[in-house]
Amino acid sequence: MSALSTAEAARSRSARPQSFVELNARERAQALLDEGSYRELLGPFERLESPWLLMQGVVPQADDGLIVARGQIGGTDSVILAIEGQFQGGGIGEVSGAKIAAALDLALEDAKKGHPVQVVLLLETGGVRLQEANLGLEAIAEINSSLIALRQHVPVVGVIAGMIGCFGGMSISASLCSYLIMTREARLGLNGPEVIEEQSGIEEFDSKDRQLIWSVSGGEQRHVTGFADYLAEDDVGAIKNCIIEAFARGIPATHRSEQVDDYLKRLAAIDASHQLESSEVRKLWSKEKQL
Amino acid sequence: MSNEKTISTRGRIWFEALAGKQAKHVPSVSSVLVADTTLQKERVRFLAIVPDPNNRFPCARQGQVGLQEGWNLAKQVRDAIKADENGEKRAIIAIVDVPSQAYGRREELLGIFLAAAAATDAYVSARLAGHPVISLLVGHAISGGFLTHGAQANRLLAFNDSGVMVHAMAKNAAARVTRRTVEELDKLAETVIPMSYKIEDYAKLGTLYKLIDGVNVDSPEPKQVEQVRADLSAAIADARSGQRDLSNRLKSQGAQKNRSATLVVRQRIAAEWHSNGTSLWR
């Protein structure tokens, strides 16, 4: 099935649930933007590929796994930056990272001129693409810098739909978004289960224990404990509604990453002498306990 | 714990060399050092993350950046921003020697990614508010540890020393994950510059303001410390006269040569942003 036909099908059957998770990055952007408004920047025909992959025996992709799409969401000018999880696990390389950072900077220029553009990040990534190591790391540093500058002027909404989830340095970017939307199929973490097990041992984290993995980093846990703002069903319409609702709230009075005293107080109350269970964190940090 | 992580003392050595022996840690958090002092005429807040074998979070005992480290860095930087709100913005200098972020279950459950975001946010906010934010790389600057502490500086300085490295993943771990030997990784890095663990190669990417030669990093002589003070002062002055974003990294010669794909992306996307003759916001 071609990209376009899937997205069109999504629209024509808008009354019925249409899985968002099973769409690729381009289809996701097409499905979220208002009908007829989709315009892709630096599309695959421009062949802006990673210059570092071929020399390592990896076939590059013409869009480097990052879709930049302009259009409208709910009638308002928007840009969607969608990471393709099927290419190199969504890993951020020089080109894909530069696309995100550059788009954020252009949105900032527009916002400063009084023309705010809604920015949506579709996050499906393991973090830095290891074959481009330091340039991926640098790109993420620049993305984070640009994101913080931009969100003072216009909200930035992050969506982690799954199945890859959002890990590594990009979990920091996700946490810098004005609003974060997750599904139950999505996970959010700085370190993936395998990395924790390898670095700290199986008693710290058993990466084969699926229940443990989901109870720690799954969308439901992240939402209940206040790290994500919305828990959306895996449905194009539901996710689009969350995005529209988030933008309608405007710029948060205090971003999560600015709530330093609150989180220091919460941390001080944690007994770190024993291993934590996700149920304990739910009890301590559930949304109802927050101001 | 993996025995790969040897405990480094470089962070504390340089913190004490530059900020004085009265170096103090944040109350009840021995892994975060903070000191206010002056460098020539500039007021400076120094910050460092150091190993604390008694850290109450077990996965953050060897100098890794964990929950307390991220949130307390954020607190110290934000306190400086607030105190200087209506006056001269002091310089903030991060002394960087971080083996990695903390790899633990407690960390993930309690949102280490948000703690990292909080420190990142504080450093960026300081920079945008007009504080010169300077990083001095004295040891390892790896992955999430570096993103949290160091990467957001207006000006990055590093010692030209084999013990100083910036990378996305510690070398042994990267070898295992990519199914290569450490020797093969080194060979690969000769042609793929961003893969290199050598700080001279990192410098070729154009992100560094200065690579400092001729310093005994593990036990510096007084005149070497003086040289570093002068380098930091120059970096502060340069930051005060420059942009508050990270665009200087893209204007460097290194970036022109080795980040040409980044520059092409930026050029083309800017050209296409408002194209098709229609203004999308109307």
Image: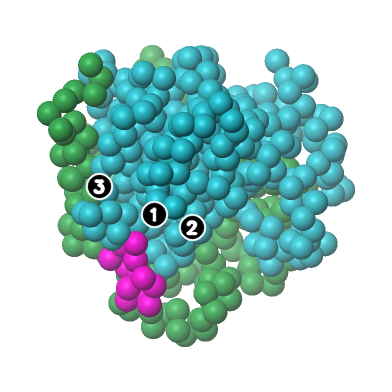
Chain colours: A cyan, B green
Mark 3 to mark 2 CA distance (whole Å): 19 Å
What x and y, as percent, mark residue A118? Answer: 38, 25
| Crowd class of label 2 (few under 14; some 14 to 19; many from 20; radius 10 Å) | some
Residue carrying label 1: A65
| Crowd class of label 1 (few under 14; some 14 to 19; many from 20; radius 10 Å) | many
Q: Which mark is residue A86?
A: 2
Residue drawn at point x = 79 percent, y = 58 percent:
A209
**Foreground residue, A168 or B104?**
A168
* Badge 1: chain ID: A
What x and y, as percent, mark residue B48? Answer: 54, 47
**Foreground residue, B62 or B128?**
B128
If the image is split into quadrants, where does the C terminus of chain B sit? Answer: top left
Report whether mark 1 lies on the same chain as mark 3. Answer: yes
Q: Is residue A218 left or right of residue A59?
A: right
Residue drawn at point x = 16 percent, y = 25 percent:
B278
What x and y, as percent, mark residue B231? Answer: 30, 51
Q: Quadrant of residue A31?
A: top left
Q: Is residue B90 visible?
A: no
**Residue A53 among those drawn in magenta:** yes
Q: Amino acid at mark 2?
A: Gln
Asked which secondary structure carries label 2, the reply is loop
> Which numbered disc flags the more N-terminal residue, 1 or 3?
3
